Image: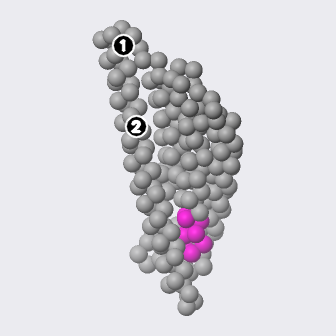
Amino acid sequence: MTEHTPALRRAIDILDRGAGVIDLLARFAMGAALLGVLAMLLLQVAIRYVVNYPLPWVEEMAVYLAGYIAMIGTSVCLRMGFHLQVDLLRDRLGGRVRVVHFLLVNLVVAGFGFFLLKYGIRFVDLGAGQTSPSSYFPVALGRLAMPIGGGLLIIQSVVLALRALDELAHGPRQTDQSLS
């Protein structure tokens, strides 16, 4: 280890803690959105049976919130390691090669996050000024889930890639599980 190792690891730890706070906020946002969908759908069922007239905006709002849940959930799942993985090749790799594989995968994910961010912003711009036909909800707000999800994905994948680089440069941490 070099004399700069403690400072580099501290910097990565600070970034990782910051990404952890962002992850926690993302989980709360997902939970709130899920509760919102549940509440709106229960309201829709109750109104439909009591008044015999469905609210025209409920399904549309539920779809918008489901988009937020899915897009925000990508970063949460990435951080937790819950994404679908084909690990046949990875399991056959040695320790350092497995960490390089982990690094490359997270760099590709960061690239995909950048794609979502860049083109999500364009997608939001296309909906600027438009409202949905049934609820008159601004279309751009529903589409905003895409660049938000892309930005969150970039944050988590870059932090995971930095952790892999740290492990490649300085070896596995004593208190952490190795990425390999």
Tell me how the rendering is colored: one colour
Q: How many marks?
A: 2
What residue is pinned by disc 2?
Answer: 34
User: Between 135 and 107, which is closer to the camera in this rendering?
Assistant: 135
Residue 24 drawn at (x, y percent): 41, 55
* Residue sticking out furthest to the front: 129
- Classify residue 91 as left or right of residue 77: right
* Residue sticking out furthest to the bottom: 3
* Residue sticking out furthest to the left: 50
Residue 131 drawn at (x, y percent): 58, 27
Q: Residue at left 47%, top 18%?
A: 56
Q: Residue at left 60%, top 75%?
A: 168
Q: Is residue 160 magenta?
A: yes
- Which secondary structure dominates the residues rendered in magenta? helix
Gap between marks 1 and 2 measured at Cα: 21 Å
Secondary structure, mark 1, is helix
What residue is pinned by disc 1?
Answer: 48
User: Between 179 and 23, which is closer to the camera in this rendering?
Assistant: 23
Residue 105 drawn at (x, y percent): 63, 58
Q: Specify whether residue 156 is in view.
A: yes
Q: Quadrant of the N terminus?
A: bottom right
Query: Within 10 angstroms of label 2, few (less than 14), some, or many (20 or more) residues?
Result: some
Position of residue 25 relative to residue 33, above or below, is: below
Position of residue 158 relative to residue 137, above or below, is: below
Amino acid type of the residue that numbered disc 2 sits on in the rendered structure: Leu
